[in-house]
């Protein structure tokens, strides 16, 4: 792309001449940016009222607490009010998560500058992921175990990599039966560092596999909604992977569990040394 935003594409090297096709990409880039900025602004503006709703729901729940001195004996109306307050709390938490993930996605799509890449300890990422997913896994009596190579290094953003792997582990937990095991395995070769998340869950049908990384696409609408997910988790993982020069792959059998593999480059991006001249890489 040249400074005028025009792609010049060589079309053919036929009988001694090259034909060149000019495509104006300025307008489509501009529109994509306008759309991202709009989603980012709306999401940001929604955060405050959603936060207020959550606080108000909490206040209502406190005020209708049966054991409290202020409401020792709840009337039928208060019982109903309490039930509504619980629903408001549940739905506003869910809305808050949706807005948070929409913001995250627009950031990853380039609405904001990406953090400079740094060496990231894969052991740290896994420890962080186990920490973040402990409560969800325990609630479903699911054991999350790590295995494979220790001491591996990836390059990029530690928080983004932890978010990506946590999303994969959360899905593994959400789409598996109680009492099953989720494995997080690390492996490296000369070119790649891999983090693979394997579950013994419901699996994904072949015609859904290609689409699950799309925003809001869900293989099983009813089940997905009941997990409280937003439908954005895998889109976020995909963007984090590609921003890190890597990719995410899935292999799955319907009814037989799934493996999601995050594959990252084993060497630092070209510009890392200029960013971290004394890091000794
Ligand atoms: P959600 O919030 O719905 O989980 P995601 O983007 O994380 O959104 O996932 C998209 C869809 O992919 C899910 O709704 C589910 O149908 C399917 N999916 C993701 N991970 C798994 C898994 N480990 N096992 C089975 N299905 C999965």
Image: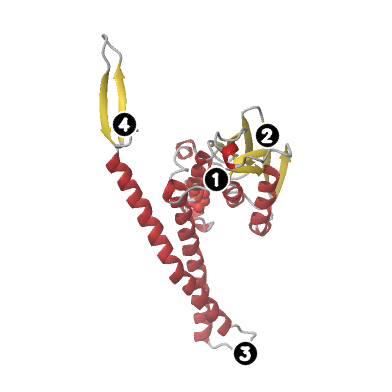
Q: Considering the numbered disc 2 on the image, is that residue within a helix, a strand or a loop? A: strand
Which residue lies at the image location 26% right of the left edge and 23% below the top edge?
20
The N terminus appears in which quarter of the rendering? top left
Judging from the image, what secondary structure is the residue with disc 3 in?
A: loop
Q: Position of residue 138 (x, y in %)?
A: 68, 57
Estimate how packed mark 3 is, as few (under 14), some (14 to 19) or many (20 or more) residues with alpha carbons within 10 Å: few
Of labels 2 and 3, earlier in sequence is: 3
Q: Reading the chain from its start, which is encountered first: label 2 or label 1? A: 1
Q: Which circle marks residue 7 in the picture?
A: 4
Which residue bears the numbered disc 1?
A: 116
**Quick check: is the Cβ at mark 4 less than 8 Å away from ligand 1?**
no
What's the mark number on residue 187? 2
Nearer to us of marks 2 and 4 is 4
Give the mark nearer the N terminus: 2 vs 4.
4
Closer to the N terminus: mark 1 or mark 3? 3
Report, in whole angstroms, how far the alpha carbon at label 2 lies from the one at label 3: 58 Å
Q: Which one is closest to the eye, mark 2 or mark 1?
A: 1
Question: Which quarter of the figure is the C terminus placed in?
Answer: top right
Q: Position of residue 200 (x, y in %)?
A: 64, 43
Of the two numbered discs 1 and 4 on the same chain, state the one appearing first in sequence. 4
């Amino acid at each position: 792309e040249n400074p005028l935003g025009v792609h010049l594409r060589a079309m053919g090297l036929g009988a001694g001449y090259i034909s060149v096709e000019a495509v104006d990409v300025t307008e489509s880039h501009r529109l994509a940016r306008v759309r991202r900025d709009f989603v980012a602004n709306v999401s940001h503006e929604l955060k405050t009222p959603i936060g207020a709703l959550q606080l108000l729901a909490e206040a209502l729940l406190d005020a209708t607490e049966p054991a409290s001195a202020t409401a020792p004996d709840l009337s039928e109306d208060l019982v109903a009010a309490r039930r509504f307050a619980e629903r408001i709390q549940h739905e506003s938490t869910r809305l808050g998560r949706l807005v948070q993930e929409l913001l995250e996605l627009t950031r990853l799509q380039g609405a904001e500058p990406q953090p400079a890449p740094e060496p990231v300890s894969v052991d740290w990422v896994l420890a962080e992921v186990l920490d973040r997913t402990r409560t969800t896994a325990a609630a479903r009596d699911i054991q999350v175990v790590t295995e494979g190579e220790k001491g591996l290094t990836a390059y990029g953003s530690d928080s983004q990599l932890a978010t990506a792997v946590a999303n994969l582990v959360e899905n593994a937990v959400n789409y598996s039966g109680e009492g099953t095991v989720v494995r997080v395995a690390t492996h490296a070769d000369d070119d790649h560092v891999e983090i693979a998340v394997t579950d013994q869950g419901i699996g994904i049908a072949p015609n859904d596999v290609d689409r699950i990384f799309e925003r809001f696409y869900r293989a099983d609408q009813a089940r997905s909604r009941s997990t409280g997910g937003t439908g954005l988790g895998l889109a976020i993982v995909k963007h984090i992977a590609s921003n890190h020069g890597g990719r995410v792959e899935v292999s799955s059998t319907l009814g037989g569990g799934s493996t999601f593999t995050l594959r990252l480059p084993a060497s630092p991006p070209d510009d890392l040394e200029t960013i971290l001249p004394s890091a000794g890489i």
